[in-house]
Image (cartoon, helix red, strand yellow):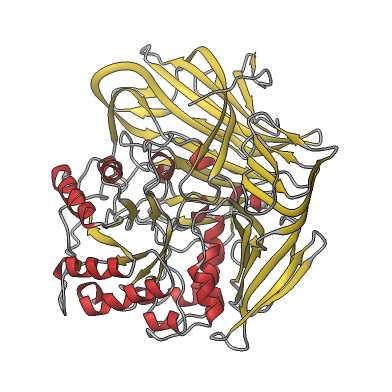
C-alpha cells in the first residue's frame, strides 16, 4: 500500500484539567473527530462534528471507547503515551461494485495508551470526506491466546427529530433476513429483544448517518447492536452464546491483535451515503494477484420456480437454454444437485451447458457443527482437506463458482470458515456467493472472488413468509439506502407475472428495474423460463446486455420507504431505474446534468395500464444538460431506461470533471474545459482537432492521452 504524505494535516493536541483532547479532520476539513481522555478516571470518549459555513454541527455526540479482555480491561485507567499521524492516499481497483476505480483518501491518527497493568492499547481514527472510522489494536507480542469479551464502543446519535431505518437481529441463527423499521423516531425504544443489526441508517437534523463494520478477519466475531432504549445510545454487541451450536461467543487471538473498523458514514444528502465506498476503503487490499478469471454477470436459476428442479436434469436443460437465448453467462444449480435424475447427471449437464456456451455454478451446504440443515452436498466445506479436494474436482470440470449456504452464525469460528473458503476458492479460480450468512464486511476488496452475498430478505420470502407480500414494495425502496450500501446483495429479483403462483404487488417493470436498482456482482433471475421468453423483445435485450459491475453509481432521487431512482454507468452507457414503493402514482422529472451531452439510443420500459403490462420504446435521443425527462410510475410501479452512446459523435464539448476511466471519440472535434482527477485514465480521440481551453486540468496521478485520429482507430 502506497501512502502519500502532504502538509495539509489537521491534527491538534491540547490539555486541560478535564481531558486530554486530540482531533483528526477529513481531507476537505468538513468532518472532524475529537477523541478525549477523561482525566478523572482515564476513560476514552469521542464525538464527531461537521464544519460548514463557519458553523460546527454535531453528528455523533460524546460516545464511549474501550474494550474488555478476560484477563484485563481497557475501558478506564488509561494513560496516554504518544500519537502518530498519517495521510492515506491510494488508488485501487475492484472486480465488482458500484464503482470499480476508487481512491482511498483520509487523514489518520493513532493514539497509544497503557492501562493500570502497563499493557498497551491503541486507538486509531480515520476521517474521510464521507465519514469516520475507528478501530482498536493490542500492539504487544505474545504467543499466548487472549480473549475479548466485550466491545465498549457506543454511537450516541442525536435523539430530537431523528429517525432510523434499522433491522432486528436474530441471535439464534443470524442471517439478516428481517424487514427494516421504516423511519421510526429515536425518542422511543425499539422493541427488538435480541438486539439490532448492522447496517443502520439514521436521519438526524444535521446529517444522514449509516453505521456498520468492516475489515473483519478470522481473529474476531461479527458484531451487531444491542437493544435500543430510546436514549440515542447504540452499543456494539457480541454474538449470542446460543448462536452457532455452542461455538465460543467471545473472540480469541495471539498478539499483536487488531480489531475490525467501526464505520460511520456521514452525508449531508442521501446520495453521499448511498454512493460511499468506505467499507471497501478501510478493508485490506486484494490478496489475489490475477483477477482476470473473475467475471461478473447475470445467471439463470431454477430453484425458486421449482424447489425440486436442481435434481431434474431435463428441467435444468431448459434454464441452460434460457441463458443461451438471453446471452447470459451462467446457470446456478441449487441444493441436492448431486442427486440428479431424469435423463442425466452433473457431468452430462456440464457437457450440455458447454455446448451452449453457458457456465455453471454449484450450491453447497456449509455443513459442520454450526448448522443442522440436511440438504446436500454437505460436509464438504468445513474441513479444509475435503473442501480443497472438492474445489479441485469441480474446477477441473469447468465450474465457475460456488454458492455456499446455511452459515447461520456470527461467531469467530464461522468468520474463519468464510475466509478460508474464499482463500481456497481463489486458488482454484472459483467465484463465491454466500447465503444464510453475515452481512458484507469488505471482503470483496480483499478477496475479489466474493461476488455476491445474501444477508437480505429476498424473493424467496414470497414463498415462505406470508407477511412479505404487502411489505415488499416498501422493502425494495429501503434496501438501496441500507443493506446494499455496504456490499453486493443477492436479492434474486425479477418475478414476471404470477406464473409460479407467487403473487406480488409490484409491476413487472418494477421487477425488471430491480436488476439495476440493486447491486450484486452476480445477479440471479428468480422466475420460470416462460416468464422471460415471453417478455417484449426490448425487455429481453435490456436484460441480456445489463452489466453487473459499474464504473459509476449515482443516486438521482429517492427516500427510504417511498421511491428510488438509481443511475449506473458502464463505459459511456447509462442505466437508469426508478422504483415506486407506494400505492400511488409518482411522477419523476429526470434531469440529464450528470450525463455527457451527445447522441444516444434511448431504450425505455415503463408501466402500462395494469401491473403486468410493459410499455417499451427505443428512439434516437440527444442528451443536453437542459434536458428533462418526465416519467409516471404507477402504484408500486417503475421504469427502466438505457442510454447507449452512439458509436461515434461528431463533436464533444466536455465540461464535467472526470473521475474514472473513459474514452471520448469524435469524427470531427473535441473541446474540453474540464478537470481530469487523479483517479482517472482518459483518452480524447478526434479526427480534426482537440481544443483544451481555460479550465482544463489534469491532476497529479491522472493518465491523459490525446490523438488526432478519429473513431475506432486507437
Residue 500 in sight here: yes
Q: Residue lying farthest bottom?
A: 609
The image position of residue 669, as x and y in percent, is 79, 51
The image position of residue 95, as x and y in percent, is 45, 47
Question: Measuring 39% from the left and 14% from the top, which residue is drawn there?
Answer: 116
Residue 352 vs residue 649, the one in the foreground: 649
Question: Measuring 30% from the left and 44% from the top, which residue is drawn there?
Answer: 426
Question: Measuring 85% from the left and 37% from the top, which residue is drawn there?
Answer: 694
Residue 62 vs residue 527, the one in the foreground: 527
The image position of residue 489, as x and y in percent, is 44, 57
Q: Quadrant of residue 605?
A: bottom right
Q: Specify whether 338 is left or right of 34.
A: left
Question: Measuring 36% from the left and 50% from the top, which residue is drawn there?
Answer: 438
Q: Residue lying farthest right?
A: 694
Q: Specify whether 429 is left or right of 139.
A: left
Q: Quadrant of residue 435?
A: bottom left
Residue 506 in sight here: no
Residue 218 vs residue 412, the one in the foreground: 218
The image position of residue 196, as x and y in percent, is 44, 52
Q: In the picture shown, does residue 678 fall above or below 146? A: below
Q: Specify whether 563 is left or right of 490.
A: right
Residue 390 vs residue 415, the one in the foreground: 390
Q: In the picture shown, does residue 154 fall above or below 570? A: above
Amino acid at each position: 500500500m502506497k501512502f502519500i504524505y502532504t502538509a495539509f494535516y489537521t491534527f491538534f493536541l491540547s490539555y486541560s484539567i478535564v481531558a486530554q483532547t486530540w482531533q483528526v479532520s477529513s481531507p476537505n476539513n468538513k468532518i472532524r473527530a475529537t477523541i478525549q481522555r477523561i482525566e478523572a478516571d482515564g476513560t476514552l470518549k469521542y464525538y464527531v462534528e461537521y464544519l460548514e459555513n463557519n458553523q460546527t454541527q454535531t453528528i455523533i455526540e460524546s460516545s464511549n471507547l474501550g474494550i474488555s479482555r478476560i484477563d484485563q480491561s481497557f475501558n478506564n485507567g488509561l494513560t496516554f503515551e504518544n500519537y502518530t499521524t498519517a495521510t492515506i492516499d491510494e488508488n485501487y481497483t475492484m472486480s465488482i461494485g458500484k464503482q470499480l476505480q476508487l481512491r482511498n483518501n483520509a487523514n489518520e491518527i493513532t493514539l497509544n495508551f497503557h492501562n493500570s497493568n502497563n499493557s498497551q492499547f491503541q486507538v486509531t481514527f480515520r476521517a474521510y470526506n464521507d465519514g469516520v472510522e475507528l478501530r482498536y489494536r493490542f500492539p504487544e507480542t505474545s504467543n499466548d491466546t487472549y480473549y475479548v469479551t466485550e466491545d465498549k464502543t457506543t454511537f450516541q446519535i442525536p435523539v430530537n427529530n431523528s429517525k432510523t431505518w434499522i433491522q432486528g437481529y436474530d441471535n439464534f441463527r443470524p442471517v439478516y433476513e428481517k424487514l427494516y423499521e421504516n423511519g421510526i423516531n429515536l425518542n422511543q425504544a425499539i422493541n427488538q429483544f435480541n438486539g439490532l443489526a448492522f447496517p443502520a441508517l439514521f436521519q438526524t437534523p444535521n446529517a444522514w448517518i449509516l453505521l456498520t463494520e468492516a475489515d473483519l478477519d478470522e481473529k474476531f466475531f461479527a458484531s451487531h447492536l444491542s437493544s435500543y432504549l430510546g436514549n440515542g445510545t447504540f452499543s456494539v454487541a457480541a454474538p449470542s452464546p446460543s448462536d452457532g451450536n455452542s461455538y465460543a461467543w467471545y473472540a480469541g487471538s495471539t498478539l499483536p491483535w487488531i480489531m475490525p473498523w467501526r464505520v460511520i458514514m456521514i452525508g449531508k444528502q442521501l446520495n453521499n451515503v448511498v454512493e460511499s465506498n468506505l467499507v471497501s476503503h478501510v478493508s485490506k487490499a486484494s490478496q489475489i494477484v490475477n483477477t482476470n478469471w473473475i467475471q461478473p454477470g447475470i445467471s439463470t436459476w431454477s430453484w425458486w420456480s421449482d424447489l425440486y428442479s436442481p435434481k431434474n436434469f431435463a428441467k435444468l436443460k431448459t434454464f441452460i437454454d434460457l441463458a443461451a437465448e438471453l446471452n447470459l453467462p451462467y446457470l446456478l444449480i441449487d441444493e441436492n444437485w448431486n442427486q440428479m435424475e431424469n435423463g442425466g447427471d452433473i457431468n452430462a449437464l456440464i457437457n450440455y451447458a458447454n455446448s451452449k456456451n453457458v457456465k455453471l455454478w454449484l450450491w453447497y451446504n456449509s455443513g459442520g457443527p454450526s448448522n443442522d440443515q440436511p440438504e446436500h452436498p454437505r460436509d464438504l466445506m468445513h474441513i479444509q482437506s475435503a473442501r480443497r479436494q472438492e474445489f479441485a474436482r469441480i474446477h477441473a470440470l469447468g465450474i465457475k463458482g460456488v454458492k455456499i449456504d446455511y452459515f447461520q452464525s456470527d461467531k469467530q469460528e464461522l468468520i474463519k470458515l468464510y475466509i478460508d473458503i474464499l482463500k481456497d476458492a481463489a486458488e482454484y479460480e472459483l467465484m463465491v456467493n454466500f447465503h444464510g450468512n453475515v452481512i458484507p464486511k469488505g471482503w470483496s476488496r480483499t478477496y475479489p472472488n466474493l461476488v455476491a452475498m445474501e444477508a437480505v430478505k429476498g424473493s424467496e420470502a414470497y414463498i415462505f413468509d406470508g407477511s412479505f407480500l404487502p411489505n415488499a414494495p416498501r422493502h425494495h425502496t429501503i434496501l438501496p439506502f441500507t443493506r446494499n450500501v455496504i456490499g453486493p446483495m443477492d436479492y434474486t429479483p425479477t418475478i414476471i407475472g404470477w406464473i409460479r403462483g407467487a403473487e406480488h404487488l409490484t409491476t413487472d417493470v418494477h421487477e425488471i428495474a430491480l436488476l439495476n436498482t440493486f447491486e450484486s456482482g452476480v445477479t440471479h433471475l428468480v422466475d420460470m423460463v416462460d416468464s422471460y421468453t415471453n417478455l417484449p423483445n426490448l425487455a429481453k435485450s435490456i436484460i441480456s446486455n445489463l452489466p453487473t459491475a459499474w464504473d459509476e453509481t449515482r443516486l438521482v432521487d429517492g427516500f427510504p420507504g417511498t421511491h428510488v431512482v438509481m443511475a449506473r454507468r458502464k463505459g459511456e452507457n447509462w442505466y437508469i431505474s426508478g422504483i415506486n414503493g407506494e400505492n400511488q402514482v409518482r411522477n419523476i422529472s429526470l434531469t440529464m446534468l450528470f450525463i455527457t451531452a451527445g447522441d444516444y439510443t434511448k431504450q425505455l420500459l415503463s408501466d402500462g395500464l395494469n401491473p403486468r403490462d410493459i410499455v417499451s420504446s427505443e428512439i434516437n435521443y440527444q442528451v443536453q444538460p437542459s434536458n428533462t425527462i418526465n416519467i409516471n410510475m404507477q402504484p408500486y410501479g417503475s421504469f427502466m431506461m438505457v442510454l447507449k452512446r452512439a458509436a461515434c459523435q461528431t463533436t464533444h464539448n466536455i465540461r464535467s470533471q472526470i473521475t474514472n476511466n473513459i474514452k471520448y471519440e469524435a469524427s470531427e472535434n473535441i473541446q474540453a474545459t474540464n478537470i481530469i482527477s487523479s483517479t482517472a485514465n482518459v483518452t480524447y480521440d478526434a479526427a480534426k482537432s482537440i481544443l483544451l481551453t481555460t479550465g482544463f486540468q489534469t491532476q497529479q496521478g491522472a493518465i491523459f492521452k490525446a490523438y488526432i485520429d478519429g473513431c475506432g482507430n486507437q
